[in-house]
Image (spheres, grey):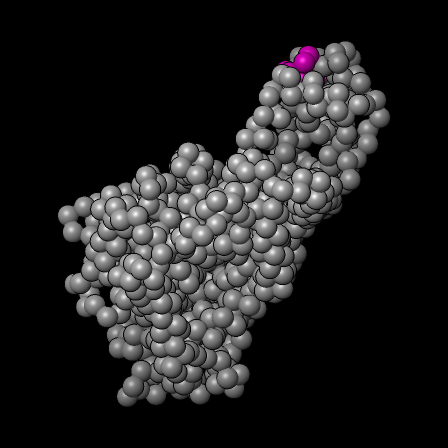
Amino acid sequence: MSKPSNSAHVSDRRSFLGKITGLIAAFVAAVVGVATGKYALYPAFRKMSEEQNWQVVCPLEDIPEHEPVKRSVVISQDAGWGRFNSQRLIWILRDGSRVVVFSATCPHLGCTVNAASNGFMCPCHGSAWTGDGQRLGGPTLRALDTLDHRIEEGVLKVKYEFFKQSIAEKEIIS
Amino acid sequence: MWKKLYSWLDERTGVEGLIRKINDEPIRGGARWSYVFGSGILLLLVLQFFTGIFLTMYYAPTSDHAHASVAFIQKAVSGGALLRGLHYYGSSAIIILAILHFAQTFLFGAYKERRELLWISGLLMLLLVLAFGFTGYLLPWTQEAYFGTKVGTSIMGEVPAGGPLMQRIMLGGREITTLTLSRFFTLHVWLLPLLLILLAGSHVAFFRRSGPAGPYHHRDDARTELFYPRQVFLDALVFLLIFIVLIVLSLNLKAPLGQQADPTTDYLARPPWYFLPLFELLKYFPGNMTLVPAVVLPGIAFIVLAVLPFFDRKEERHPLRRPVATVLMLLGLFGSGGLVILSKYQDGMNPDLRAKIESQRREELAYLDAPFQPEEIGRSLPIEVPMVQVEGNMRNPVLKIYFANCANCHGRDASGGALGPSLIRLASSRHLSRDFLLKYISGHVREPSPDSMPRFQQLSLDQRGELADWLLNLRSPDQLSEPGETAAQSSLPSVPKPAAAPSQGPKKAAEIPRAPEAFLKTCAFCHGNDAGGNIGPSLVGITAKPERSPEDLLKLLDDSRAYGLKDPMPANFPKLSVDDKKAIVDWLSKLQ
């Protein structure tokens, strides 16, 4: 390589052109970066789980009394390019016309809660609840989450919700 | 502080030396505008990799969701239209730059002086870029994508001996299915990029080994300049210009996106611009000679180009002193360009073609501007539409189609029924086109809504065509009677009416209890008086199906959408009392 004649000038130009090139690179990176960032984060902060409708479970009289009864409801979730219909489990306790409905989602870390001999039990981390959903032991910080229900013309209807996990209070995720 | 960190890093990584090595490449004859093509391609490839990776974040490579997921990216996601636009127009920019880079290298004789591998790796990348274009074209699963790929893979099947086999392997079967889409996706997103990284890496390495050829006139051979800063700056400036053009195109013109592929339509497919020369050439060869323009000519051209540096050993690089090479290259370039223009010109000159292309384009733009509609996804039973048993001789085939599919809702004399409007003079008074009717019947131009007509996709294009022609001329209910008969004494089949007597078969009547009144009033219209199916599916034995237990059926009557059922099944039946529903479900569970 041949040394250019005027080295002072050349090094000035070198750093000037280098800076412009750096600015161009920064501009392109910023445009693409911002667009991609917004793109990638798009669904994360949108309210995706929309208000669920009241779901028909079954006629009240079909539910056996004094034992936990497992049923499912279908929920609809808006997830980008589709509205996805899927099932979620609920536990129902019935005493005559008195009804309590629990979400079968463990308030600890979200596994599915099972009925046990003395109440309810989560298979994943051993959280346990009494037969009426009160906290007995294990890592869970709260009782089983109750779901709103109503009885219309003898038919049980439930409104399914999602709750924040691993906290002592029941709080709906919105 | 920064200097310390940098020298700490450099000691351990040798980053300083690496940057030196990249930046201090000596350029014979100095930096030039004419050297920007290679770097431009490289930078665009980086952009394609980046945007492509993020496009797969929302893309679903299956035939039933690909289109919706691309529409979601294009219409709903923030930045989605920009990223997809950059990827779409970026591919064209790469092809343009690649052609310029190739033509320049050839014309300036820069493939000479032990640059055989550099030249061949470049040629292979030119093919690779076209393969990217071909495989990427199918991914949005639009009409254009489907039919374009259909033609492209059919040409592949024309190759003697191995062609049909190759086509089968490419498609993953005999037809374009969701498997084809998966294969194209794997090629476009995994295999071709890997190959490209290998080839591009070799290309750059070969280039660094042989060094730039310098100007063909050798006047400035004595002068040498380093790659950084002037050439880097020129490269960056050109890339910036291209980048801005791509952004403007993406945001204003938007990357095109038409409607979802429908193999039953007569879509007029045209390939992307870079395949137009081949496409135009195909027209001048008869069907049994497809091979010549599609495979033989490009194949010969490629082989000749690939072996060129092995035979062309003369040192002369000046294009004017290599007249044969220069004339051939210019002929090739201008010939290809001419073929593109010719193909556009021919489409424009033919009024039928032009009208069709324009109407397709309008539909595409309308779809692109329409708001995004998410797909309904869930476990659903397919709605089968069995043909109604047609009594007597139906001599007019279109009436057969009408009574099997339309009469239940639109009435036996087409003057309107409980669910559908009158069809008399409907098409003519609204100036509906035949094309529109074809698509309306198949559900292709409609977004699903709770009250809309079901999609009759089971009807063939011919059947829909007959219906459309008939509808366009339907001016009076009398047209539904057979020729030679009056409407009163016609042998038209009886359309089941709500609350009509249950099926008359004496044996059946003895075995199966009569349907409850509520079923006859509410369900029989679609599912038949004996639940044997009509325009709705048969419900006989339904309780044996998964998620159709009596308990499920009761819930389903309150919210059929929750069970994944779609139109035309209503979402719920508010008029049915709990007792009615129970009676219906009880009766259904007895039908085996």
Along the horizontal axis of the image, is B573 left or right of B32? right
Q: Residue at x 20, y 60 (%)?
A: B292
Q: Residue at x 57, y 28 (%)?
A: B18
The residue lying toward the viewer, choosing from B442 and B266, is: B266
Within the image, what quadrant is residue B263 found in?
Answer: bottom left
Q: Residue at x 28, y 88 (%)?
A: B484
The residue lying toward the viewer, choosing from B38 and A12, is: A12
Along the horizontal axis of the image, is B578 left or right of B545? right
Give coordinates of residue B282: x percent, y percent: 26, 65
Q: Is residue A86 placed above or below B533 in the rendered structure?
A: above
Q: Find out whether residue A25 is within the magenta segment.
A: no
Q: Is residue B451 placed above or below A174 in the rendered structure?
A: below
> The C terminus of chain A appears in which quarter of the rendering?
top right
Q: Main secondary structure of the magenta part?
A: loop
In this view of the protein, can residue A155 be seen by the observer? Answer: no
Give coordinates of residue B256: x percent, y percent: 53, 61
Along the horizontal axis of the image, is A104 left or right of B376? right
The residue lying toward the viewer, choosing from A84 and B207, is: B207
Q: Magenta segment, which residues?
A: A120-126
Q: Find out whether residue A122 is within the magenta segment.
A: yes
In this view of the protein, can residue B350 be seen by the observer? Answer: yes
Q: Which residue reaches farthest front?
A: A5
The residue lying toward the viewer, choosing from A79 and A71, is: A79
Give coordinates of residue B122: x percent, y percent: 38, 45
Give coordinates of residue A108: x percent, y percent: 73, 21
Q: Residue at x 29, y 86 (%)?
A: B483
